[in-house]
Amino acid sequence: MKLPGKTTPYKSSIFVLFPGILTSLKEKTMTVSELYMSFPKLELGDYISALDCLYALGKIEIDSEKGTLYYVDADTL
């Protein structure tokens, strides 16, 4: 997992992926693979790490029955 720090600049960390992922999921729910395909130059490991972090932060959820990811709107909680 590439977190920003002394050896990893912010621009090389997974944090820069968060806005793009969240924006895509705000527009529509997607499967994990559909979302991944919308970022063609993204490494799979970085993508999975970004999803892990966003899930842990409560920003995204997964519908296990449908297999889709969706954005969690904090205003509706």
Image: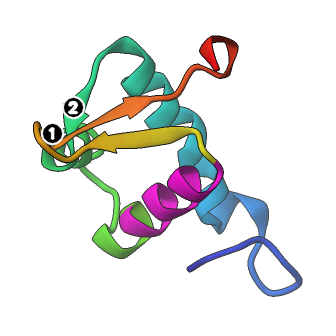
Residue 9 vs 37, above or below: the answer is below
- Visual colour scheme: rainbow
Which residues make up the magenta segment? 48-57
In percent of width and height, residue 44 lies at 29, 69
Whether the residues at callouts 2 and 1 have beta carbons within 8 Å, the answer is yes
SS at circle 1: helix
Q: Is residue 77 above or below residue 14?
A: above
Q: Residue 23 placed where, x, y %?
A: 48, 24
Magenta span main SS: helix
Residue at 32%, 44% (x, y): give it.
Answer: 62
Is 30 left or right of 20, judged from the image as shown?
Answer: left
Q: CA distance from mark 2 to mark 1?
A: 6 Å
Closer-to-camera residue (40/74): 74
- Residue 53 appears left or right of 42: right
Q: Which residue is mark 1?
A: 34
Name which residue type carries label 2.
Met
Q: Quadrant of the N terminus?
A: bottom right
Q: What's the mark number on residue 30?
A: 2
In the image shown, does 65 or 36 lie closer to the viewer?
Answer: 65
Relative to 9, does residue 8 appear above or below in the rendering?
below
Quick one: SS at disc 2? strand
